[in-house]
Image (tube, rainbow, N blue to C red):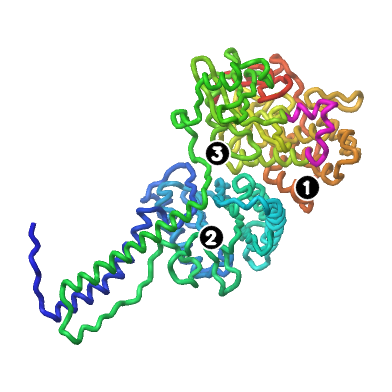
């Protein structure tokens, strides 16, 4: 097809030229708003879309959600926090809120909320509960008045701190993050927000930030931030920057100022990354947001106009240059965002077909363990033996080889693989891979050198290696691991077999919860359930579960209480006997508490190394955890809060639940089925009686 030259009068050429040039900013503005759709969302750091019942856009819930997002977008608030509810019928009601970073302007806050209100419908088009995070704000909505804790996101800077200043950096980081958490929780300005900078090497500074949603109490904010700070080592140990984003709070640190130091001092860019384009005084400007242009004027008075060729020569290079600038801007932003690696928790259970990267061949496992040599065996459990192995890359692993006649079949095996592979927390044992060939079912875990807690706790010759500071750290680690399972994981998980032999200790004596073959996944809104097949270990089971098959997260809370009493006393609940005083450890601890001599419960080997207040606090918490009524037991979030804060008042415990001491099938309550096997812990333990269900959920 041939192009025919177009002729026009000089005046027409001038008007068309002006129109084209004046149209250019609109075109580029449109392109700049289109490019983020092609290259990614408009600056969103991360988002969660809870897998609940979907809604349709023309439903009452959809209409209420649109009303909610409109209200949030148009809200004005001096504190950067706003919540709203839309809908009169409870089944279709929508609750929402936004939180803006405490140092951004009201305009930047509103701009971020507007973007979030649009993005969240694209990112989560049918979900009834969602949250999206940005640098300047977070926005969330839910169909429930009490928001669930929708997971968390870790982000880390890829650059490391130099080894010469690493030790000092970690010390300053720990101290500063603790300080700003306390400052943020007690901020009286209406914003639970704090920032602080500190020198860690010469003139090098550390910049830190902490913030909670304004609806949290001081204690709840402290608890949220303490948990967030405790997770920084998981993702960001030795890194130049990192952040933890939670649904109700967030923390961040960098070695450059990423927040406003004063009203007229903008945050600096990350070292080595160009600052984004846009006005320097625009706190909320995003790299790919609409770009402002000044109108272009050309004086065509003399000379009677500009030729079409010249017009093309002006428009095309300018248009291409500006377009390339915008594309380059977005590329730089995408490259800059790669400085951070978002580690979000998967929203769906892995299918076995999606886990091929974790699968090892039987030949490679045989080579790693010297063909399952007895010299490599490091433990025995009810479901099989555990061997130490060395992979070709030199990594040490623990290989759990399930016995062919064990109670754990292919379904239980897949259950453990599916669960553990998606759980990532420093207080949970990490699954590295698996093998499923013929009748062989093998799990490959990280190697934990210090064996299990019971290996030290109940051996008179090894008890002294667990001084009080280590035991207290182990108690806190177990609590954080259980809290992750109950609340911070994308799935609500009940372990159902927490005991000392299922708590492993790494090289620094940090606790790692293991053995998820009996774990139970709960729905988002589910709080309790019933089963006719009881699983777990007698002595750690709550009475409502052991006797009636009723289970909830309070089952693990009960087991945690038993664990704490065992850690303090170095006595087994399952084999405790105190002549003439009490029949079991729980009753013994209760009587000592009632007689105002609780410290008599303490292992004598701790004499001289313990903190009286910490021991008393732990005994108090343990007795609350083993209350007979599940509603009287604290949540793990409250447990962790009270472990970290002595200012929180605890209720007075009542007499604990009775101890289910029977360990034979004939004594199982009528109507409940069990399958008795030996202990199932991994990788080291002594034999205990565990019960595993015949058929999985």
Q: In the image, which disc is placed on residue 491?
A: 3
Which of pointers 2 and 1 lies earlier in the amino acid sequence?
2
Secondary element type, mark 3: loop
Where are the magenta residues, as a range?
Answer: 452-471
Is residue 344 toward the left or the right of residue 483 in the image?
left
Q: In the image, which disc is placed on residue 270?
A: 2
- Crowd rating for badge 2 (residues with CA inside 10 Å; few <14, some 14–19, many 20+): some
Q: In the image, which disc is placed on residue 650?
A: 1
Name the image quarter holding the N terminus. Answer: bottom left
Which of pointers 3 and 1 lies earlier in the amino acid sequence?
3
Which of pointers 3 and 2 lies earlier in the amino acid sequence?
2
In the image, residue 56 lies at what x, y percent? Answer: 38, 47
Name the image quarter holding the C terminus. Answer: top right
At a point 74% along the width and 26% down the height, the residue shown is 539
Of tags 3 and 1, the one toward the viewer is 3
In this view, the residue in front, 646 or 379, is: 379
- Crowd rating for badge 3 (residues with CA inside 10 Å; few <14, some 14–19, many 20+): many
Secondary element type, mark 2: loop
The verdict on residue 627 being magenta is no
In the image, residue 214 lies at what x, y percent? Answer: 61, 60
């Amino acid at each position: 097809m041939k192009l025919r030259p177009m002729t026009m009068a000089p005046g027409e050429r001038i008007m068309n030229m002006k129109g084209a040039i004046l149209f250019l900013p609109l075109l580029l503005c449109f392109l700049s708003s289109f490019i983020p759709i092609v290259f990614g969302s408009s600056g969103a750091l991360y988002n969660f879309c809870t897998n609940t019942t979907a809604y349709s856009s023309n439903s009452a819930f959809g209409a209420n959600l649109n009303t909610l997002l409109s209200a949030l977008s148009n809200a004005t608030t001096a504190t950067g926090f706003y919540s709203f509810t839309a809908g009169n019928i409870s089944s279709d009601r929508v609750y929402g809120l936004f939180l803006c970073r405490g140092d951004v302007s009201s305009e930047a806050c509103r701009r971020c909320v507007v973007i979030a209100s649009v993005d969240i419908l694209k990112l989560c088009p049918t979900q009834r509960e969602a949250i999206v995070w940005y640098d300047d704000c977070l926005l969330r909505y839910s169909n429930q008045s009490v928001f669930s804790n929708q997971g968390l996101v870790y982000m880390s800077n890829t650059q490391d701190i130099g080894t010469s200043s690493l030790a000092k950096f970690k010390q300053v980081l720990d101290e500063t993050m603790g300080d700003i958490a306390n400052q943020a929780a007690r901020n009286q300005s209406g914003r639970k927000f704090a920032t602080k900078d500190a020198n860690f090497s010469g003139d090098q500074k550390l910049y830190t930030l902490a913030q909670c949603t304004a609806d949290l109490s001081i204690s709840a904010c402290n608890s949220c931030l303490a948990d967030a700070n405790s997770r920084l080592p998981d993702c960001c140990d030795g890194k130049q920057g990192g952040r933890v984003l939670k649904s109700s709070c967030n923390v961040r640190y960098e070695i450059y100022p990423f927040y406003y130091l004063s009203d007229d001092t903008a945050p600096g860019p990350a070292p080595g990354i160009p600052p984004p384009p846009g006005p320097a005084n625009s706190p909320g400007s995003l790299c790919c947001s609409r770009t402002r242009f000044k109108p272009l004027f050309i004086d065509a008075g003399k000379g009677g106009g500009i030729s079409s060729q010249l017009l093309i020569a002006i428009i095309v290079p300018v248009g291409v240059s500006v377009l390339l600038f915008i594309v380059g801007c977005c590329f730089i932003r995408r490259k800059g965002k790669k400085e951070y690696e978002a580690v979000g928790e998967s929203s769906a259970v892995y299918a076995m077909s999606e886990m091929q990267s974790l699968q090892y061949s039987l030949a490679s496992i045989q080579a790693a363990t010297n063909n399952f040599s007895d010299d490599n065996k490091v433990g025995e459990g009810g479901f099989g033996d555990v061997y130490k192995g060395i992979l070709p890359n030199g990594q040490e692993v623990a290989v759990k080889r399930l016995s062919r006649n064990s109670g754990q079949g292919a379904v239980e095996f897949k259950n453990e693989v599916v669960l553990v592979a998606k759980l990532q927390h420093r207080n949970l044992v990490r699954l590295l891979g698996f093998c499923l060939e013929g009748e062989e079912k093998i799990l490959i875990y990280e190697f934990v050198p210090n064996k299990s807690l019971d290996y030290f706790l109940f051996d008179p010759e090894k008890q002294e290696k667990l001084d009080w500071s280590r035991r207290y750290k182990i108690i806190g680690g177990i609590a954080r691991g259980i809290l992750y399972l109950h609340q911070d994981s994308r799935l609500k998980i009940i372990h159902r077999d927490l005991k000392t032999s299922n708590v492993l200790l790494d090289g620094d004596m940090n606790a790692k919860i293991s053995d998820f073959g009996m774990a139970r996944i709960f729905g988002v809104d589910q709080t309790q359930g019933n089963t006719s097949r009881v699983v777990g270990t007698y002595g750690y089971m709550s009475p409502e579960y052991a006797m009636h098959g009723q289970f909830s997260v309070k089952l693990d809370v009960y087991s945690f209480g038993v664990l704490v009493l065992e850690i303090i006393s170095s006595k087994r609940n399952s084999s405790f006997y105190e002549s003439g005083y009490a029949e079991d450890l729980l009753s013994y601890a209760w009587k000592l508490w009632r007689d105002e001599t609780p410290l008599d419960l303490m292992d004598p080997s701790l004499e001289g190394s313990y903190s009286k207040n910490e021991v008393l606090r732990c005994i108090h918490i343990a007795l609350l955890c083993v209350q007979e009524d599940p509603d009287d037991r604290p949540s793990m979030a409250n447990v962790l809060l009270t472990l970290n804060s002595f200012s929180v008042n605890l209720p007075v415990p009542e007499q604990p639940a009775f101890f289910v001491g029977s360990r034979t099938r004939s004594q199982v309550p009528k109507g409940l089925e069990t399958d008795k096997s030996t202990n199932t812990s991994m990788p080291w333990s002594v034999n205990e009686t565990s019960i595993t269900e015949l058929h999985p959920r």
